Image (cartoon, coloured by chain):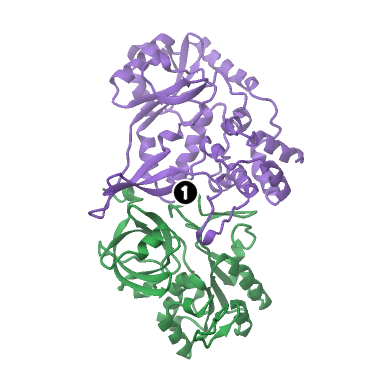
Amino acid sequence: MNAEASLYNPREARIIGKKELTDNTKLFELELEDGDRLNQEPGQFVELSIAGVGEAPISVTSSPTRGADPFQLCVRAVGNVTNALHKMELGETVGIRGPYGTGFPTEELKDKDLLFIAGGLGIAPLRSLINFVLDRRDDFNDVNILYGCKKPCEQMFEDEVQQWAQRQDIYHEATVDCCPDDACWDGNVGLITELIPGVDIDLDETYAVVCGPPVMYKFVLEELDKKDVHHDQIYLSLERRMKCGLGKCGHCQINGADEVLYACQDGPVFNYERVKGFEEAI
Amino acid sequence: MKAINKGDFNGFVDNLIENDEREVVGVQSKSNKFAFDPLHKAEDLRLDYDVTILPPKKYFMPQRETLVEYNLEEGETTPVNQVVPRIIMGVHPYDLVAIEQMDKVFEDTHEDPNYLEKRRQSVLVGVNMVNVSEYSFAHTMGTATTDSGYDIMLTDIGDRYAIEVGSSKGSDLLEQAGNAVDDIEPEEAKKVRDTLEALPEKFRDDPKFDPLELPTLLKEYYGEDEFWEENAEECLSCGTCNLVCPTCYCFDVKDVNDISLSEGERLRTWDGCMLEAFAEVAGDENFREEKASRYRHRYMRKGRYMYDRFGDIACVGCGRCSEQCLPDIADPVDVFNKMKEGTS
């Protein structure tokens, strides 16, 4: 079978790691059976399939700087495919197509101040870039990481978050929307927008990289506007239910008054200046 | 240009049905409508039809198509491309234009072998319109005639069909007609020209817009929420306009297990942007929740987005959507006229 004829045929990938991050979110470590590396760019996604259940687009949460390691997917059990994946055991295999899409502009971000703003599961795609940056720390200037969740028990990647808090070369703040009385939490309580005023922003140098639930973008962008962050220095990772990943199925089309974008080709990472007029983008 | 007697043409078609390895399909009557179906004898072929229920896109992008077969016990997946080589008889010019547009979609970014191989292995026998559907406005869209997209093109000139060869696949096919095909007489060639020149009169005369104005008009109307809400008010979100459209190609991918539960197929099925769940994402967010936004999307897609991406106006004026829309709100002429005249 030649490569062209297998456009929709997934590569087999074996689950070699599985870790519970929250009560409905797990981190999966996968290795391609053909021995290849995934060779993804930070911010790209794969089509993950489980035969008999279906296929779903999932962002890759691991950084290519750790390309010799298995690649990682951070998956919340919300649909058929993700629920089925959660039930799978180590050693079982899934299908992988991709990586697809346009990721974060790592070259453009070099030597810049970076402000990461992650809400909830939005940490999953952002983590691919955060770890990329931390693995090549000297290539970038200031690093700020703001991470918000609904409740303390929903915070993921605890070990890494602790490291961000401890490192002198990272400014890190975490917040939760609300904190139950019995929870142990020493971070901020309130919306993630509350953390933005505290960040030191250099208008020429700061690039904001934002990912979170659709409802978060509007308020975060308003807050960034108050700080006068240039719109072309803001990158967003937008989620759509891509069925093909190939620019054909039509599901991820994002319409604006002037232009049409396909999240699976032009995105999922978009420059805010480019998509801000798009009624259907955010 | 060549020509063939109608009796000889029927013999040629019967011979193809009998002896050609490819499946011969063509337009036939179906209840009081017409449809592309497998052809069992030449006399069933209705080259005088007005419009078919579904466009011939179903032969290149079937309603259900297996992309991958999987075995659940062994965990194996196998790519599948079920290609049935076909001779497709009686394709009208507007559908040929639509197929040429769809070719670009499946060639762009990643070549899609499941579509393209079916196209490569099919022969398109076009026919110029004799009868025109009362809903069709192909003349307005510039698709009532075409000089490309076919392998051979027939024109009814009375006792004979004039034949224009469009490709080597077409001339190879015509060889099977042998001596029955001869050169066209000058007066017959004039008859072809006269027939095509008389065609515009057969179309509805109410379109008031020029297709090349559509990208600009639609851009102006993008933010006119009231306009879209009013026009979409009675929309049932049934997706029929998508299914019958020769330029609609959006699809879903889903797994269907065999009854044995040991194997199954990953299918590509037709999908439609007018269906409510089309733009849903995880967490119950829907980026086109209102029917007005879906209705607008379909028009933008036809008159603007595909033009921006490929330079094509993706409405070919076949009239199928307006004919088959239950609440009768899908007529593109109605919407485009309103934009042109500034009415709602």
From what the image shows, is residue B189 above or below residue B94? above
Chain A in the picture: what colour? green
Q: Tell me if I can see residue B162 in this picture.
A: yes
Looking at the image, residue A160 lies above or below residue A40: below
**Residue position marked by numbered label 1 in the rendering:** A249
Q: In percent of the image, x 48 and y 87: which residue is there?
A: A165
Q: Nearer the viewer, residue B6 or B302?
A: B302
* Frontmost residue, B97 versus B2: B97
Q: Quadrant of residue B207?
A: top right
Q: Residue B283 in the image: x percent, y percent?
A: 52, 62
* Residue A167 appears in view: no
Q: Position of residue B14 (x, y in %)?
A: 34, 15
Q: Chain of mark 1?
A: A
From the rendered image, report the letter of the chain displayed in purple. Answer: B
Q: Amino acid at mark 1?
A: Cys
Is A169 above or below relative to B314?
below
Q: Quadrant of residue B130?
A: top right
* A226 or A174, nearer to the observer: A174
At mark 1, the secondary structure is loop
Q: In this rendering, would A21 be left or right of A236?
A: left
Relative to A159, residue B135 above or below: above
Q: Quadrant of the C terminus of chain B?
A: top right
Q: Quadrant of the N terminus of chain B?
A: top left
Residue A81: x %, y % from top left = 39, 58
